Image (spheres, rainbow, N blue to C red):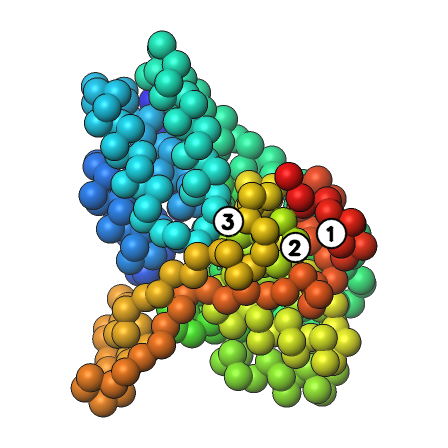
Amino acid sequence: MQTLSTTSLQIRDNQLWILDQQALPQEKVWCPTPDVATLVDHIKTLRVRGAPLIGLSASLLLALLAEQGMAKPALAEALEVLRASRPTAVNLMNNLDRMKVALAQPDHIDALVQEALRLIAEDKTLCDNIAEAGLSVVKPGSRLLTHCNTGGLATAGVGTALGVIARAHQQGRVTQVWVDETRPLLQGGRLTAWELGELGVPYQLITDSMAASLMAQGQVDAIWVGADRIAANGDVANKIGTYSLAVLAHYHQIPFYVAAPHTTLDALCPNGAAIPIEQRAAEEVTGVAGSFGSVQWAPENARVYNPAFDVTPAALISGWVLDTGVVTPEQVAAGIFQP
Ligand code: MRU
């Protein structure tokens, strides 16, 4: 396959390489990803993460395995193993559905390669279009708050919510970004802080529990988050902690925007209650681990509740900023996301 490079994915020497998002920002480590087991491990451990990136990495690997001579039945099996690697982000399933159609073609190797490359190119365009659409609702002088990581690291392009923020900053409309650290895995504190620093966007890092007092002080003009799945009624699954921000935004009458490509829509999922929510290991809550080392502070055998995502009801969302434009609550209530 041709050489390819995004912020966190590369194809070199006919091999998939991923930028280890657990090692960032302390270290920039590119990991070879030769087979399905390795990619599934990268996805489960969040070395590869972010709804769009998960789907793109799985698609690229399948195309490479086809080129390397893996037989059709084995490719079909690999596709299903990858599909099951993370349950909440629907981009993975959407991308793999397209790869499945390619796999069924007589010239399946070429079809898989072309489809994977198309998905990468499309994602870049989707991100640009989201950033463009989002600009229309960012007011000059905005102080924005964001959660988790929705930047170039999580996509093949400029990102979703963070893409909007970066574009709005370029246009002189953003004076400050509040970055939620995003416990338990610290995607905000590690990745968003790093990306905003690289982009030269002024930010201040906060712990998740500080958002409420900032809103009460009138220091947040809008909240921007990404999405892992948008249900047909507009409910949104996103990183745990998103729902609490939406409730706070509603109380403080602050606009709350969700930015995502249309590959995050799941028209067949009626509402948020039907979105599968990934439950993760207790160790992520009883302590913290990363390239900075690891520590456990909770008592041994502490019982833990650790859902990776929560659901924000459509009623708390001011706008769904898609690559096709800004979707309003009225349009969602009228059924624009329905099949
Ligand atoms: O568990 P993660 O880090 O993959 O969760 C990521 C998020 O929740 C993002 O907000 C979402 O995937 C959108 S990324 C453009």
Residue 163 visible somewhere in the drawing? no
Q: Is the CB atom of the residue marked by disc 3 within 8 angstroms of ligand 1's nearest atom?
A: no
The amino acid type of the residue labelled 2 equals Gly
Q: Earlier in the sequence, mark 3 or mark 2?
A: 3
Give the Cα separation between the discs numbered 1 and 2: 6 Å
Residue name at image x 72 percent, y 75 percent: 250
Q: Of helix, strand and loop, which one carries label 2? A: loop
The amino acid type of the residue labelled 3 equals Gly
Residue name at image x 31 percent, y 79 percent: 304
Residue name at image x 49 percent, y 31 percent: 119
Label 3, residues with CA under 10 Å away: few <14, some 14-19, many ≥20: many
Using the image as rendered, state which of residue 332 and residue 297 is in the foreground: 332
Residue name at image x 28 percent, y 83 percent: 303
Using the image as rendered, state which of residue 205 and residue 231 is in the foreground: 231
Q: Position of residue 294 (x, y in %)?
A: 23, 75
Asked whether the residues under the numbered discs 3 and 2 touch, taking CB atoms below 8 Å apart as contact, a structural biologist would say: no
The amino acid type of the residue labelled 1 equals Val
Q: Of helix, strand and loop, which one carries label 1? A: helix
Give the Cα separation between the discs numbered 3 and 1: 28 Å
Asked whether the residues under the numbered discs 1 and 2 touch, taking CB atoms below 8 Å apart as contact, a structural biologist would say: yes
Using the image as rendered, state which of residue 318 and residue 178 is in the foreground: 318
Image mark for residue 332: 1
| Residue underneath mark 3 | 152
